[in-house]
């Protein structure tokens, strides 16, 4: 429907000014806590107008169907030759709203991996050797951001992330907190030292050896976040010669887009891949004297 400026009253719009995505894998290794809040609202840009098909010609054509007479001029935002009529008559300019709509774990895998092997040999004559076995390794926990998007909507807007690898992660429960420009692929990692507080004492007979094999469970989890960019607002219409007694009218954008058969929303997909480790173990194998003993510690 359309409103003459004399009777139009619109309520103010309130919105979050940022988007935050929080992720934390659960202890089962297959599911995750995924939370997303906020949205970013801004006046539509000229580039976004083209992406959504809001040219002057298409809006004027739609106005002819909607109003019954083609508008002389149409505007979706200031400036206009008559000043800021949107502010003067309390009409909402056309704005874009970027917000996350959906998040879910799409793929995951968990595999036992060998991180390293260390050998201890007793070459000290005929005496037994007491050996402290301590294997310390540095591993990486990784986050990879990739995007699938049809148009460059949302460029220049920051997305804030709070990524926790879960309570079972070897890196502990400290979150990685950072921001990334919307649509930008990114690789982040942190170095985790494991094994420094784990020590086993073994006795190695003359000529014998002990192998310390370090293992862990390596998890890869892919999480998909779907974002929507939605447009809404009012289109200012001016008639050079009065139409039904007035020069100025405001038309609701959704009504015009219905006439133009164009969508008010476009979507983009972000894939966030987490790579992390759990269940760190050192297997100690003593094969001296053709015997094998296995000790486990974490």
Image (cartoon, rainbow, N blue to C red):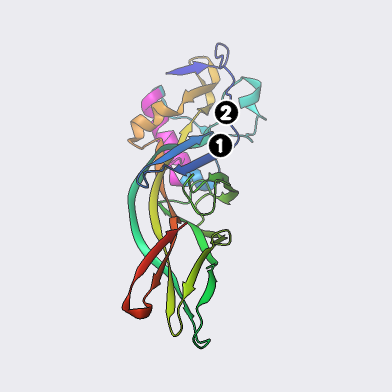
Q: Which residue is mark 2?
A: 15
Quadrant of image for the N terminus: top left
Front one among 24 and 100: 24
Residue 177 image point, x, y percent: 59, 47
Residue 278 image point, x, y percent: 44, 54
Residue 4 image point, x, y percent: 52, 16
Which mark is first along the chain, 2 or 1?
Answer: 2
Decide: few, some or many residues near mark 2? Use Cα within 10 Å; few <14, some 14-19, many ≥20.
Answer: few
Which residue is the extreme one toward the front? 126
Helix, strand or loop at mark 2: loop
Residue 40's label in the rendered image is: 1
Q: Tell me if residue 44 is in the magenta stretch.
A: no
Decide: few, some or many residues near mark 1? Use Cα within 10 Å; few <14, some 14-19, many ≥20.
Answer: some
What residue span does the magenta drawing correspond to?
A: 51-66
- Residue at the spot x=44%, y=46% of the render? 51
Check the image and report above or below for 252 versus 73. above
Residue 91's label in the rendered image is: none
- Residue at the spot x=50%, y=58% of the render? 141
Front one among 216 and 98: 216
Q: CA distance from mark 1 to mark 2?
A: 7 Å
Quarter of the figure with residue 283: bottom left
């Amino acid at each position: 429907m359309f409103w003459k400026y004399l009777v139009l009253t619109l309520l103010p719009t309130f919105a979050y000014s940022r988007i935050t995505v929080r992720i934390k894998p659960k202890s089962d290794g297959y599911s995750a806590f995924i939370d997303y809040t906020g949205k970013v609202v801004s006046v539509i840009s000229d580039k976004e107008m083209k992406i959504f098909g809001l040219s002057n010609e298409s809006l004027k054509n739609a106005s002819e169907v909607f109003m019954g007479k083609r508008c002389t001029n149409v505007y979706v935002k200031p400036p206009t030759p008559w000043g800021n009529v949107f502010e003067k008559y309390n009409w909402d300019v056309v704005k874009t709203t970027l917000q996350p709509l959906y998040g879910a774990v799409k793929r995951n895998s968990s595999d036992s991996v060998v991180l390293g092997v260390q050998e201890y040999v007793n070459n000290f004559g005929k005496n037994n050797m007491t050996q402290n076995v301590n294997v310390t390794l540095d591993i990486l926990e990784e986050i990879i951001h990739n995007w699938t998007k049809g148009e460059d909507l949302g460029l220049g807007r920051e997305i804030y992330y709070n990524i926790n690898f879960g309570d079972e992660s070897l890196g502990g429960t400290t979150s990685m907190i950072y921001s990334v420009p919307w649509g930008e692929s990114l690789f982040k990692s942190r170095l985790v030292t494991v094994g420094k507080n784990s020590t086993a004492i073994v006795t190695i007979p003359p000529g014998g050896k002990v192998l310390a094999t370090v293992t862990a469970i390596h998890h890869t989890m892919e999480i998909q976040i779907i974002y929507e960019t939605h447009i809404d607002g009012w289109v200012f219409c001016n008639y050079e010669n009065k139409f039904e007694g007035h020069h100025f009218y405001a038309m609701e954008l959704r009504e015009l887009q219905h006439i133009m058969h164009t969508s008010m929303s476009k979507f983009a997909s972000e894939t966030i891949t987490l790579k992390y480790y759990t269940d760190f173990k050192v297997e100690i194998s003593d094969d001296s004297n053709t015997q094998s003993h296995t000790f486990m510690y974490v």
